[in-house]
Image (cartoon, helix red, strand yellow):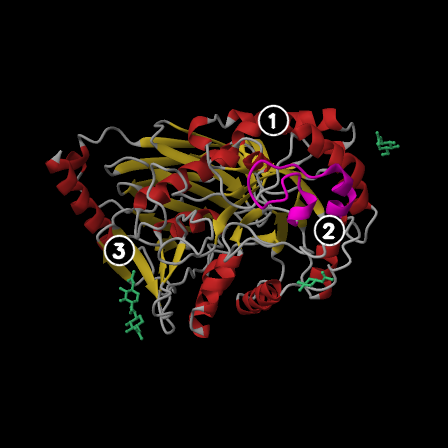
Amino acid sequence: MKGTTTLNLIAVGLLLLSLIVSPALTASEAVPCALREYPTGSVCVCNSTYCDTLEFEEPITVGGFLLVSSSRDGIRFGQSRDATKMPVVPEVKPIPKQRFARSTRPVTIQLNRRRTFQTVVGFGGAFTGAVSFNLGKLEPTLRSCLYRSYYSKKVGIGFSLMRIPIGGCDFDLKPWAYNELPEDDVHLTNFTKLDQRDLIKIAQIKELMATAENQDIKLMGAAWSPPRWMKSNNDWSGSSRLKSEYYQTWADYHIKYLQLMTDAGLDYWAISTGNEPMNAVIGFLFIRFMSLGWTALSQGKWVGDHLGPTLRSSGFQNVKLFAGDDQRYTFPWWFSQMDQGHPNATQYLDGLAVHWYWDGVTPPGLLDQAVRLYPDKLLFNTEASLGDKPFQTHGPILGSWDRAESYITYILQDLQHSVHGWIDWNLMLNEIGGPNYAKNYVESAVVVNTTSGKEVYKQPIFYGLGHFSRFITEGSTRFETTTSDSAVIVVGFTRPDQKTTLVFYNKKSSSCEVIVKDPERGVAQLHLPPKSVHSLLYA
Ligand SMILES: *[C@@H]1O[C@H](CO)[C@@H](O)[C@H](O)[C@H]1NC(C)=O
Ligand SMILES: *[C@@H]1O[C@H](CO)[C@@H](O)[C@H](O)[C@H]1NC(C)=O
Ligand SMILES: *[C@@H]1O[C@H](CO)[C@@H](O)[C@H](O)[C@H]1NC(C)=O
Ligand SMILES: *[C@@H]1O[C@H](CO)[C@@H](O)[C@H](O)[C@H]1NC(C)=O
């Protein structure tokens, strides 16, 4: 085993070297990662004057390619490109063949463009109260760097989706909602202006859009809980239902929010029927943050009789409506039950939203079943994070590649199972994975040093996300790919600009040779370091 490890390290060293010295490869325009090692792994450090970018010239001529790679052993968006060569052959393998004798035959990835699947909308993260609070701790120039890192399509990872809590969520300083007072106020007479916390968020989001030069970010709202007086238990958390006398009030609440946000200059693309309804049905035993419980039947009734008709007859009839917003094990039965609650319920839906927290123990086939039942609906993953389980480390593990691998693996799986959009949880958290009033600390792709306000740490997860979000542009259609080795996972897309994007991951702890066979464009041979993720883009 020891011998293998040494060999791998040599292989990585040579790969990096060849990326730099090979005459076939041009130096990239990008600002490289300032890698810093912590006992738990390596992060990329950004400060006010330095932050790595993902900049490249797109291959234009047929046969030109761009290969972007990240790995456990320290590669972060390493680039290898050739705009002229044909066919697509990144010759990144100066290691003598016999040294790989033990690490099996080359893995073959086969493309089949004739068989196509879903068309992707985009990728993104969540702008919670915690994110807003953490941003407030940073120097303004560093804030701008982060905005670009996430949402720029020129220097960042090109996020285009953003989930925003309507009122509070657990990632906030305390639970809150609009119109907490007066109580039993069926007409929401006190929901007339935006809360200070939202005003700060709006200013930050506008600054983000301007700085990242990305004005068409799709905003998705989701409420965690109404004010307590609308709920059966008159509390933020615990087992609860919406009191039936407030079904219309809770629908109106959403319209009021959309109106105030529009007045403030943010047009929402979508809302959901509410975050994780099962939390206050079965999860209340261990979930201590604000939640509203629904059975699927009663949610169906609410959507069919109240939210659906109210939204569609309002000035926001084009705002998309997503339901579910809960774990994979609720798929697809939740939606059929909604229709049992009201025959029109799912007709009002544009999308189905799923969270990833129990993906390890629930099969992805449930997503395909939902899509077969509701073929005209979008399917989005709307939340993901690590460290929520009792047996996991809560909060960030600086530099953890294992956590990046978890993201990469499940994003690949979701994309292979009909998902059109993928949204991460908090865009950035502090050193302990908060703030969170319920102490539900978790991991984040970016960790902010709130002690100094002068540094942020881009976790391996950030790079894992970027390998998808920057390269699988909006409107990309997935086609069939097969791999001869299940430890090399792959997805393939034809983009609207007709370029091909493959994203693949070598899960092995050893390096491997991969041969990509594209019946239309030729054959590419690549050398993949251990535990490495790649985006291959070619014309
Ligand atoms: C910012 O980061 C760069 C690159 O790591 C480093 O050279 C520079 O000294 C840092 N600036 C400050 C003020 O720490
Ligand atoms: C309206 O809400 C604010 C808090 O946003 C509260 O201070 C005020 O007392 C409320 N007004 C009434 C009449 O309850
Ligand atoms: C379902 O929607 C149709 C119009 O699309 C309406 O005529 C019908 O009354 C609705 N059904 C119920 C039970 O509300
Ligand atoms: C955050 O900054 C402080 C002050 O510069 C420093 O002592 C601390 O080590 C930093 N945290 C991390 C995780 O590097």
> Is residue 452 magenta-colored?
no
Residue density around tag 1, few if under 14, some if 14–19, many if 20 or more, within 10 Å: many
Q: Residues within 10 Å of mark 2 (few under 14, many from 20)?
A: many
How many angstroms separate mark 1 from mark 3 (CA)? Answer: 51 Å
Q: Quadrant of ligand 1?
A: bottom left
> Relative to residue 167, is residue 231 depicted above or below?
above
> Residue 332's mark?
1
Q: Is residue 245 magenta?
A: yes
Nearer to me, 277 or 80: 277
Residue 253 numbered mark, or none: 2
Left or right of 62? Residue 336 is: right
Other-residue count near label 3 (Cα within 10 Å), few / some / many at <14 / 14–19 / ≥20 = some
- Residue at left offset 71%, top offset 64%: 193
Give left or right: position of 463 versus 492: left
Residue type beneath disc 3:
Ser
Of callouts 3 and 2, the N-terminal one: 3
Left or right placement of residue 461 versus residue 166 in this view: left
